[in-house]
Image (cartoon, helix red, strand yellow):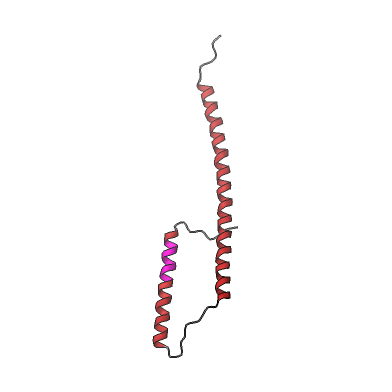
Amino acid sequence: MNAMRFQNDTNFHLRMAALLVIGLFLDHLAEQNLTHWSSPRIGIVPFALGLAWAGLFTWHVANVLLQRIRVLEDRLERLDQRTEVIEDDQRARRSLPPMR
């Protein structure tokens, strides 16, 4: 299962910060130019649900990344073992034959 991953978190945070600033600016413009505009109020329950959703999503992404790290560590360990076997084989072939 693929989870959303960002190769560079800085770009993601800069985009999200830009969206926040644009949203605040548009809200300010709407209050000034639209006579019947009022900003929506968020209650504690939707706020808590939003935080829970963000937490669960973060937990899911962290678990997916942890699984991927474990798989990569296992592959690296097996590759290390194979490399050692190949190097031992090469050393054995290059060594002098036993003296009689």
The quadrant of the rendering that contains the N terminus is bottom right
- Residue at 55% in and 61% down: 58
Q: Where is residue 54 in the image (x, y as percent from the top left)?
A: 55, 66
Of the pair 50 and 99, the residue shown nearer to us:
50
Q: Is residue 15 magenta?
A: yes
In the displayed structure, 43 sits above or below 79; it is below
- Residue at 58% in and 38% down: 78
Instruction: Farthest residue to the front: give it.
Output: 44
Of the pair 59 and 44, the residue shown nearer to us:
44
Q: Does the magenta stretch include residue 69?
A: no
Q: Give the range drawn in magenta.
A: 11-19
In the displayed structure, 43 sits above or below 65; it is below
- Residue at 43% in and 72% down: 20
Q: Position of residue 27 (x, y in %)?
A: 43, 80
Instruction: Farthest residue to the top: give it.
Output: 100
Q: Position of residue 40 (x, y in %)?
A: 50, 82
Instruction: Farthest residue to the bottom: give it.
Output: 35
- Residue at 52% in and 26% down: 90
**What is the total number of numbered labels drawn onto the structure image?**
0
